[in-house]
Amino acid sequence: MDIAIIGAGHIGGTLARRFSQLGYKVFVANSHGPASLQALAAESGATPVTVEQAARSGEVVIITIPMKSVSKLPRDLFKDVPDSVVIVDTCNYYPQQRDGRIQEIENGMPESAYVSQQIGRPVVKAFNNILSNHLMNMGKPPNVPDRIALPVAGDDPRAKQIVTQLINELGFDTVDDGKLEDSWRQQPGTLAYTTDLKSKQLHEALEKTSKERKPEFKAA
């Protein structure tokens, strides 16, 4: 399986390194072009490409960019990309710190539903609730008692299963967070966000968390 990553920041760079270590062919892109990714390529073995090439380079395509940049992606980015390609969204909305006001999200649309709307394709929400250094260093073999679990939300069972398997290979358990409309339960400020919970604890956190955004995660 080939994996393409659009975005080379903390999460994108970490996933490029980890998936390359696991033996996957990894393609990575950012808004600055392939030349800006030579250092990451030399370190990880990932292949630098353009954003347009990345969308057509993997059976799994991971979008991991600032939320404010999602609407700036090419409108036809996934035109003619087969429906079988799994698109993963890791994006988080930080209105005061980085992204400014995105009215659809302020009105209650889950962040990943907004991403799906902008790119015109279904997405699976994953990898958004863990710190990048934990994603890099805290994976463990299956059945280890203190193995961290990550939530996965989406509407396509096949796509979710593929993402679940990738997460397992990275060294983490998964908890099904339901449909994409339920993905708000793993957004910033919720009980599941950057808390490094085990499976049972994460399931309880997803069930108990509030849909009301904390003030620091609302636009000023």
Image: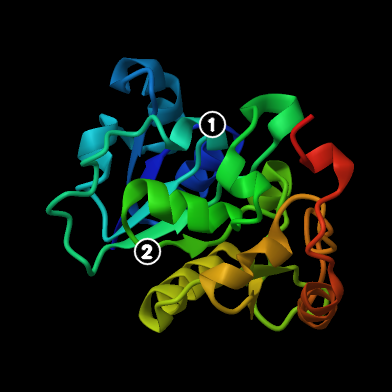
Q: Position of residue 147 (x, y in %)?
A: 75, 72
Q: Is residue 204 left or right of residue 88?
A: right
Does 118 appear above or below 2? above
**Tag 2: residue type?**
Pro
Q: How many marks?
A: 2
Q: Report which residue position mark 2 lands on.
A: 122
Of residues 99 and 161, the one drawn nearer to the viewer in this rendering: 99
Q: Quadrant of the N terminus?
A: bottom left
Does 141 appear above or below 118? below
Q: Report which residue position mark 1 lands on.
A: 68
Q: Is residue 59 left or right of residue 69?
A: left
Between the C-alphas of marks 2 and 1, the distance is 19 Å
Asked whether the viewer can see residue 180, the reply is yes
Q: Position of residue 193 (x, y in %)?
A: 78, 56
Of residues 57 and 220, the one drawn nearer to the viewer in this rendering: 220
Callout 1 crowding tier (Cα within 10 Å): few <14, some 14–19, many ≥20:
some
Q: Quadrant of the C terminus?
A: top right
Does 206 appear above or below 47? below
Q: Residue at x 55, y 67 (%)?
A: 167
Of residues 96 and 66, the one drawn nearer to the viewer in this rendering: 96
Question: In which quadrant of the rendered view does residue 81 lie?
Answer: bottom left
Q: Position of residue 164 (x, y in %)?
A: 51, 74
Question: In which quadrant of the rendered view does residue 87 lie?
Answer: bottom left
Of labels 2 and 1, earlier in sequence is: 1
Q: Is residue 176 left or right of residue 51?
A: right
Q: Residue at x 37, y 37 (%)?
A: 45
